[in-house]
Image: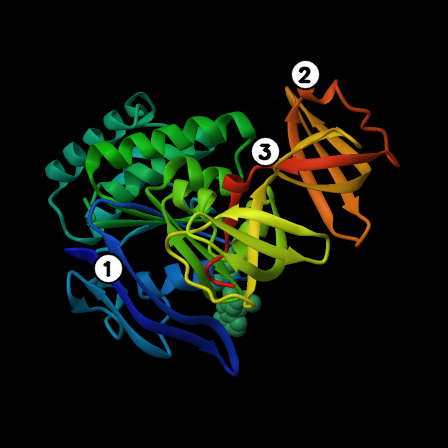
Amino acid sequence: MLDTPIVHFDNVVKKFGSFTAVEKADFQIARGEFLAIMGSSGCGKTTTLRMLAGLEDPTEGNILLDGKKINGKPTWERDTPMVWQSLALFPFLTVQENVEFSLKMRKVPKGERRERARKWLDRLGILEFADRNISQLSGGQRQRVALARSLVTEPKILLLDEPLSALDAHLKVRMQSVLSGLQKDLGITFVYVTHSMSEAFSMADRVVIMSRGKIEQIGTPEEIYREPRNRFVAGFLGSSNVFDGRLKSSGNEVWQIETEHSSFNLKAPSEVQKTDGSPVAFAVSSENMSLATIGTPWAGNSIEATVVGGEFAGASATVFLETDQGQELKVQKGHDELKTVDIRAGQKLLVHWLPEHCHVLPGE
Ligand SMILES: Nc1ncnc2c1ncn2[C@@H]1O[C@H](COP(=O)(O)OP(=O)(O)OP(=O)(O)O)[C@@H](O)[C@H]1O
C-alpha cells in the first residue's frame, strides 16, 4: 500500500459484452511516479489507460484520483490529458497554436496562453519552431510539440499510449531520455503504455506486466527482472529457463528439487514456504547458465543438452539447446567464453549453473 496514492484502481473489471478485457485490476500509482503498463498486443493495456482517462467506464470497481471516484465523470472534468501514439496534432495550426489549443478551450486569456505555450516550447527545446506548420517538423520535433501541448495545462497525470512506437531506434532512445528527464524534473505522474520491455525498463519506476487482461506482476524493473513471480513473467522477459519439479528435501539453506531431468539444488528462498513433495517451479536466467564439454567435473547443477542453434548479437551470443526430455534451454554468453566449447548444432554439451542462481517462482 502506498502512503498517498494519486491513483487507485480498486478491483476494476472491464468487459466488452461477455469478453473480459481487464480482470480485477487492483493497484495504486504513487504521486510523481513513472509507471509503465507493459504486455503483448490485446492484453488490456490501452483499455486500462482509457478507463483512467474516462474514455471507458469500468464494468465493476472504481478508479480513484486523489481519493475521489472519477469513473462516471465526463472527461473534461478530469485533469488527465493524454499524448496519443498518433500524436494527433492539428495539421492546419502552427506549433504555437497547437500548444495553445487546450488553453483556448479552457478560456485562458490570449496573453497568458501565449506565454505559457512559449514556456513549454522552450522547455522542450522547440521554441525556434513556434511559427512553423506541423508538416514542416521531423518526427522527434512533433513528439515534443505533442508533449508541450499536453503539459501546458500542467496536469497531475500524463497518460501516454505507445508514444514512441513510430520512431526509429535512434530517435526512440533519445526521446526516452527526454521523457524520463522531463518526468523527473516536473514531478508529474506518468502512466505509460508500451509493449516494449526496453522502453518500460529503461524509463519506469515501476512496471505493470499484463497478460490477457490480468496483471501478472507489478514491481520495479529490478524486482521483475530478478524475481519474476510466475512463468508468464519469466517467459515474457525472454531470458529465463523455467524448470518444474517437486520439493524433495528442504533444509534451511538448500532445497533439493526433483525434476524429470535430475535433482537440482537451489538456495532456499526466504519468502516462499513449501512442504516436502509439493510442486515447485524455478527460473534460471540465461546469463547465469554456462556451457562446458561433457565430462567436465562440476559440483553445482548441471544437465546435458544438445545445441539446436545460436543467435549472435554484438559481444554476446545466445545458444539454444534441447535436453533429452525435450526442454528448450537458452544460454547467453560473451564470445570469449563460448570459444572454449564447440557450439555447432547437434553437439551435446553440459549446461551448468549455481544453486544461488535459481529463483523459485512464488506465483506458481
Ligand atoms: N470497444 C471494444 N469493443 C470490443 N472489444 C474491445 C474494445 N476495445 C478493446 N477490445 C478488446 O479488448 C482487448 C484489450 O484491448 P486493448 O486495446 O486494451 O489491448 P492492448 O493491450 O492495448 O493492445 P495493443 O498493444 O494491440 O494496443 C482486445 O482483445 C481488444 O480486441
Work out which residue is located at the far right of the displayed protein and give it.
Answer: 346
Residue that mark 1 sits on: 7
Residue that mark 3 sits on: 287
Q: Residues within 10 Å of mark 3 (few under 14, many from 20)?
A: some
Q: Distance from label 1 to label 2 (Cα)?
A: 49 Å
Q: Are marks 1 and 2 in contact (CB under 8 Å)?
A: no
Q: Is residue 262 above or below residue 185?
A: below
Q: What element carries label 2?
A: helix
- Residue 10 at x, y = what percent? 28, 70
- Residue 264 at x, y = what percent? 62, 49
Identify the residue at horizontal 81%, vertical 37% (top origin): 307
Residue that mark 2 sits on: 336
Q: Distance from label 3 to label 2 (Cα)?
A: 14 Å
Q: What element carries label 1?
A: strand
Q: What residue type is labelled 2?
A: Asp
Decide if residue 143 is on the left or right side of residue 54. Answer: right
